[in-house]
Image: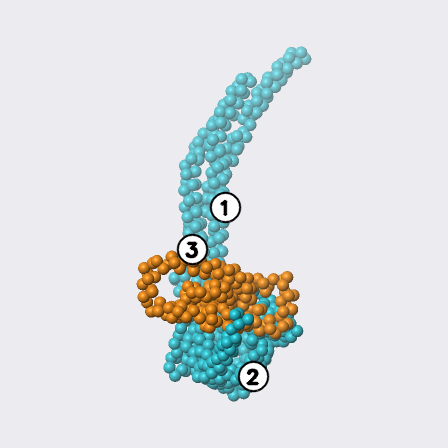
Amino acid sequence: MLTLLAKLLSALNGDSSIRQIALAIALGFLVGLSPIFTLHNIVIIFFVLLVRVHLGSFILAVGFFSGVSYLLSPYIVQVGEFILTKPELNDFFTMLYQFGIFKLAHWHHTYVLGAFVLGTLLCIPVYFISKIIIEKYRVHIMTFFAKFRIVQALKASKFYSLYNTFSGDSSLTKGAL
Amino acid sequence: MARFIRWQGMAAFFIISALIIVFCYLFAESLAKSAIVSASESAFGAEVNIADVELGFSPLQISVIGMQVTDKEMPAHNLFSFQRATAGVDVWEYLFGKVIIDELTVSQLALSTVREKPGEVYIDDETVEEGESFSDKAKGMLPEVDMELPDVKTLLNDSNLLTVKAATQLQESYKTEQVKIKALKEKLPSKDKLKSYQDKVKALGKMEVKTLADIEKIKTAFDDIKAEFKADQALVKSAKQQVIDSKNLLAQQALDLKSAPGKDWQVIEDKYQLDSLDTEDFAHILFGEAARGYTQKALWAYEQVSPFLGGSDSEEEIVDVKTHAEGRFIYFDEENPLPSVLVKKLFFSILSAEGDIEVTGSELTHQHWYRGKNSLINVSSVSNGEFTLTSQFNLTESGDFNADGEWLINDRTLEDAELTSNNTLSLTLSEAQFDGKGIFNFKNTNVESMNNISLSQASYQGEASSKVTELLLDTVKSLDKLTLDVGITGELDKPNFSIASSLNDALTGAFTQQVAGKLGEFKEKVNKGLNEKLASALKLGDSQTAELLDLEALLTDTDKAFEDLQNSDIVKQQQQKLEDKVKDKAKDKLKGKLGDLFG
């Protein structure tokens, strides 16, 4: 966990592409919102591994947004319930239901569909918001926080040496983990 | 392209996937075991032990071996345990979110077996038995017959008795009315006063009338007298009205008092259930407990199953916002629809004290409308005589539960079955041959059942400590064959029982006579006491009623006297007298003149 956090901070502070980190967070949001072992999540994880996005950020985002998903589960279920039980969409879902892949993806489950729809709709704003925050962080926040004594004290800690290990070899740009 | 794609990631994906599959394959049984133990402990609220779980992957089959579920009420016992349960699951449907079990087999299922060591209990059962159980009530009924007939003296001193209340009210009314009348009496004109009025009027009648001025004088005097006695006359009238009111009130209250003993007896009969004290109640007492036990078992089973029996409508209610929601599957129309949970075939072998029981079932689900087939359950045993039970049930889409079935028992030997045990009577069926059959029908929680039971070659043991229970015990012991017709109707949680028994015929003569004599004696004593209270209250009233009647007569006479005085034509009489005098005078004058003329 500490290593993952160090990787994230290293990526934020280093020269890793902002887009890679923001995309990792957005995809982590999409995966974290749904129950982990769903068909669409497996596809997204495959995509994340295949495409050069920051894996540390992705894993942390999945962990964080899984917690958020747990807290928001009643609302996610309500969204899924609303969509799946809407009479106007009944024919559409009945048609989809005839396909095994639809049932296999559990998109006829209120939580899974609610999470997938919310995740898909919100992952785009999450991507852009993450991008802006990382940019701001690199320009202003990082320099602002560096002045604090506590930060200087942290720099002397084991965590910082770990951080240095990763920042010294900013592997993200090279496509490795 | 290489700038965006990392090909080694694909390898990582497949390696991770393979690792997960291998992990699942290696640890699936342990994971399944932990999951089943955890879910069962959560469901049953007590320790659950599973010896092993075996998984077969083609076709997917799960076997649970040596499962024991602690009874949270009696932790030293198992609620149930079985040697092996095997379920073949349709993997494809499972991945689609449905649990379709082709065959579920549970072997050597046993209820209430003793555990090697007591199991832990995780949830306190908060359901407190509300009120008396039927068993307690049934046991409480017998002593009432013999011991709890109320003490006559205590009963008669009960201030709630209508007779006591009516007598007290009557006495109080007597007192109140007496005070009122006494006050009136003091205001009434005396006899002397009345006589003085009469004398005055009489004197006016005797006055010498010579001129019209005298008549006018008499009239004025008469008017003065009338004005004088008018106030007294009003007093007499109001006193008369008061006496009539008092008389009516007391008459009504006396009437109420007279009818009170009858009403009191009715209340006593109801309170102590003396009216329902017939032989049929003894059939209830002896056998109703057992019948109620079976319906309570049925209710328990229904309550356990009912949360899972929601129709399609009830499922939609899960939308409520909770701290954590898990969602649900929504099923749409398809060519071959399947319920979300279905056990196509079921086979249970149950070990019980009465012998081995086999349960087979088919189409077990809570969504019968998908396949249009009823769930079937067959229970049979041949260990001790023949026992069969066949039942079918279904749930409609709107959530209505319908079930019917029949049962049959032939030539079953019963031993040491306790029928009742309380302070005045304990009765155990030592041995008997049991035959019976019945039908039942459920519509939601509404039950309708008719059962015929026959006990032959029966021998009983028991003790009785009162005359009534001794008679009952002797009669039961003398019966070689006993038949019972038990009807059950109404809501499952409060069913109505009708129990007709050959015991009734056997008891009718002796018992009814005994009870009737005892009750007759009691009734006589109570009624005698009530009538004494009635008589003393009415006796007290007799003198006062007589006094009222005397007073009424007196007032009527006085009133009449005043009326006579008021209506007296004394002035007319005097006028008439004057007219007669004038006429006589004129006649005399005319006679004198005519005598002179013709004389």
* Residue B375 percent across, percent down from the top left: 59, 77
Q: Earlier in the sequence, mark 2 or mark 3?
A: 2
* Of residues B401 and A56, the one drawn nearer to the viewer in this rendering: A56
* Of residues A118 and B30, the one drawn nearer to the viewer in this rendering: A118
Considering the numbered disc 3 on the image, is that residue within a helix, a strand or a loop?
helix
**Residue lying at 44% horizontally and 75% vertically, measured from the top left:** B38
How many residues crowd mark 3 within 10 Å: few (<14), some (14–19), many (20+)? many
Chain for disc number 3: B
**Residue lying at 46% horizontally and 66% vertically, measured from the top left:** A16
Q: Are marks 2 and 1 on the same chain?
A: yes
Q: Which residue is mark 1?
A: B248
Quarter the N terminus of chain A occupies: bottom left
Q: Nearer the viewer, mark 2 or mark 1?
A: 2
Q: Name the tint of chain B in the rendering.
A: cyan
How many residues crowd mark 2 within 10 Å: few (<14), some (14–19), many (20+)? few
**Residue lying at 63% horizontally and 72% vertically, measured from the top left:** A99
The answer to the question of whether label 3 and label 1 lie on touching residues, with beta carbons closer than 8 A, is no
* Residue B281 percent across, percent down from the top left: 50, 72
Instruction: Name the amino acid, label 1.
Output: Asn
Q: Is residue A141 above or below residue A171?
A: above
Considering the numbered disc 2 on the image, is that residue within a helix, a strand or a loop?
loop
Q: Is residue B425 above or below residue A115?
A: below
Q: Earlier in the sequence, mark 2 or mark 1?
A: 2
Q: Nearer the viewer, mark 2 or mark 3?
A: 2
Kindly indicate which chain is depicted in orange in the rendered structure.
A
Instruction: Name the amino acid, label 2.
Output: Pro
* Mark identifier at residue B164: 3
Q: Which residue is mark 2?
A: B59
Chain for disc number 2: B
